[in-house]
Image (tube, rainbow, N blue to C red):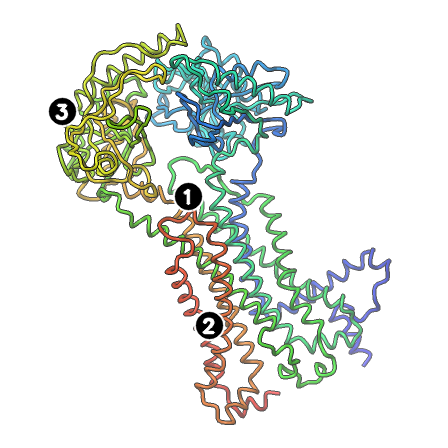
Amino acid sequence: MRDAQAGARREFGNVGLAKETTRDLWGWRWLENFLEDLHYGMRTLGKQLGFTTVIVLTLALGIGANTSIFSLVDTALLKALPVRDSDQLVALQWKAHKEPAHLSITSYGDCETSNRKADASGCSFSEPFFRQVASKDNIFSSVAGFGGANQLTLSGNGDASMVDRAEYVTGTYFETLRIKPAIGRLLMPEDDTPSAPSVAVLSYRFWRSRLGESKDVLGKTILLNRVPFAVVGVAEEAFDSLSPGNVFDMWLPLVSDSRLDTPWDNRDIDASNWRLVIVGRLRPGAAVGTATAEIETLFQNEVTRPVGHGGLPMLKPEDGATVELRPLEKGLTGARLNAAAPLYLMMLVVGIVLLIACANVAGLMLARASSRQREMAVRFALGASKGRILQQLLTESLALSCLGGAVGILFATWCLAAIVGFLQSNQDGPLPFTPTMNTRVLVYTAIVSVLTGVLFGLAPALRGLSVDLTPALKGGAGGSQLSKAKRGRFTAGNSLVIAQVALSIVVLAGAGLVVRTLQNLKNVNPGFDTQNVLTFTVDPTLVGYKISDADHFYEQLKGRLTQLPGVTSVSYSWRPLLGGGLWRNSFHLEGTPKDQESDADVLPVGPDFFRTMRIPVLDGHEFGPADFAREQMLSTAREKREAERAAKMKSDAAAAVGISSEDLPPAPAIVNQAFVRRYLANMHPIGRIFGAEPADPAKGRDRSAGWEIAAVVADARYNKLRRAVQPTIYIPSSGGQVSFAIRTAADPSRFVPQIRAMVNQLDSNLPVFEIHSETEQIERQIFLERLVARLSGFFGGLALTLASIGLYGLISYEVARRTREIGIRSALGAARPDVLRLVLKQGMRLAMVGAMAGLVLALALTRYAKEMLFEVKAADPVTFLWVLLLLFSVTSLACFVPARRATKVDPVVALRYE
């Protein structure tokens, strides 16, 4: 007997020892107990390999899903800006009660902006204002300004290509941010002077991907828009942008802007041209409040003084112009604004999935705890304390959760690879955020694993403590010995199943709404035929073409493309339809008050555009050669006037407009049905002139001859599927960047090599970019909805599967526990259908209660995702009906399998069960 007791003590980790003394508690005894508990727990779990595998895989799915999404959140929303001593940096932001008048604002997504007529805000400032701020050396130790560059052609190193992500920065940019070079040097103030040679600094990613990390790049000359630039250095690897998500290939001195852009650009002296973000490093001891007041005074003086456009101010004193010096992390949000909502939504979804997994595992552990009552009774009889037993059971739970976390990291790695691959396939350049399994993500996984172990292990552990020794130590103790309280309708196991079903409803409802949104977007009629259309972009003006030369180039290229076998029609436009670009214009409509302006979208198009895109012409005719010749004349005249205006601004910045121009005829225009419905209802539109206005120096506007309507076409979506069709004006295209559209008889992608070869034959310095089929373009436009739909659908299916497994496990356990009762019922004459209904009723009752609770919870939560929805309400009854049907179909199957097993119970065997 003594040997048996000694063996029991070793088996159960010395649980029969006396209670720990205070010295043991604060010494190493707890570690010894933990190791003994862990060793015993792993041996016990190893003997139940099937049970352990199910739990570990269940936890791996929940923890892995959370890890993968958190890695995205960490990279996109939580990662610190890649600069040193960022707490000393501030970004300037302005606010006003109204939008400043006759103002040109260029924003590159560095901060949250508002272009509303009331309560306007932004972080773009003029270059003259930047120089005023930089002069305040009592506030800032250094000040930097930066703004995005237009697309640049890159040549001098193989085939010509595009640089889509270059940034103009002041010479103090890298000094202010305290960025170090990987090789060479970075830009200095001397580089940002008119007499300095043109230099460039490359990003580490661009240097590695395009130049193979060759150190020979230092001093090498590259051609940007045919202008030579010497590469002087490469920025450190950790820095690719200041604003989150705005990844750049290279940085150029701000003075380079005038060398690469049109020669009449006067942004360096124009106080009404706001395009620079200003970042300053505060001097030690500088009071933010005092600094803000001083900078705000400068800004108010800037916007309330007369400027070039007719000598009128941009804002009045009562317009409440203010400037705020915001901490850099809060001031520059970049692409975080667009990423925040879907990422937080997915964090909520995977959090729910983890809760379902925990509830599932807790249910399995509760069932296991019931079968371990005799073991617990023996341990109590040997002298183990409740605290010691609780520690043992929680140690087993933690071991399971840590195993699940380890496997979950593998699952998360697979999920991340799939997500990154999907994102990369929908983007031409590098991803704005590249998630990785870094230390912070692994720490997050460890914390989640520990908390998960406590969460799902607490209820089974408490169940293990509430054991009645006398009946439990009897050999025949079984489920029938449970107290009436544990046989109640809503036991802990039942409650966990109800919670799983309810949470599954929430996830499935959200997934259903997103899938409905995606389907609605795909079913939108764009107003033109999207099949077998290939689009690509060229811009001859970047390499020095004049307007007439560019138009001639387009004619040549269009003619050659039309002759390709398999090409049915060719045209071009300023931007491709549904390509994201938008040009909106204000005009005055005859018969309305002089101070009332109307708005319409504007799209310059080339010959045969409507025939190529298959947009029906309802009245009138498409543009002819005379229309394009007249537009070229108008464009040449505008080009000349802009050059004259620039020269006058250089000599007198206060007299920038009002230059007389020749009397030009109205420009031809084609309008859509939406335009006619809104502005020309009950009128015959053909030949009608609108938008004619006299010169108005006070508003910075020259005389406009307006437009003359030549035709009316059917409605077509312009830039986005989500955006409703607006009144649209189509005008003849002349000069500038265009996107060609080629309609083919078969797969258009096979024409890409021929297109590149043709453009190269016409001009080897001219790159072709943004080559996509129209269907690919649409898919890319809705890629966020597609990603969220895929993820939410996957996690919704996972949640439903876990909930079904939990329900199946509970019903199976109940069938096993009630085997004797079922046998007695069968012996007394109960038919198999009666037994089947008995078991199914229990499972479906739990499913219905969970479904009702889930509906209430889903209705409360899905309304927060309404901004992501399209043509579907957050409380869409059809979606919720399909979710309920899916839920009851799956749960019915989960209940039917153990119910069918119950009907096969042999009464004789069942009566011998105990």
Query: Dot 1 lies on which element?
Result: helix
Query: Dot 2 lies on which element?
Result: helix
Indicate which disc residue 894 carries: 2
Of pointers 1 and 2, the one earlier in the residue sequence: 1
Point out the frontmost of discs 2 and 3: 3
User: Separation of disc 2 and disc 3 at Cα?
Assistant: 71 Å
User: Separation of disc 3 and disc 1 at Cα?
Assistant: 43 Å
Q: Position of residue 677 (x, y in %)?
A: 23, 38
The quarter holding residue 878 reads bottom left
Indicate which disc residue 423 carries: 1
The image shows residue 222, relative to residue 843, as above or below, that is above
User: Separation of disc 1 and disc 2 at Cα?
Assistant: 36 Å
Quarter of the image that includes the C terminus: bottom right
Point out the frontmost of discs 3 and 1: 3
Q: Residue at x 63, y 22 (%)?
A: 282
Give the side of residue 484 with respect to residue 618, left or right: right
The quarter holding residue 486 reads bottom right
Query: Dot 3 lies on which element?
Result: helix
The image shows residue 816, relative to residue 587, as above or below, that is below
Q: Nearer the viewer, residue 327 or 14?
A: 327
Amino acid type of disc 1?
A: Leu
Indicate which disc residue 625 carries: 3
Of pointers 3 and 1, the one earlier in the residue sequence: 1
Q: Around disc 2, counting alpha carbons within 10 Å, would you say few (fewer than 14), some (14 to 19), or many (20 or more)? A: many
Amino acid type of disc 2?
A: Ala
Give the side of residue 686 with respect to residue 463, left or right: left
Q: Position of residue 155 (x, y in %)?
A: 35, 22
The image shows residue 415, relative to residue 645, as above or below, that is below
The image shows residue 651, relative to residue 337, as above or below, that is above
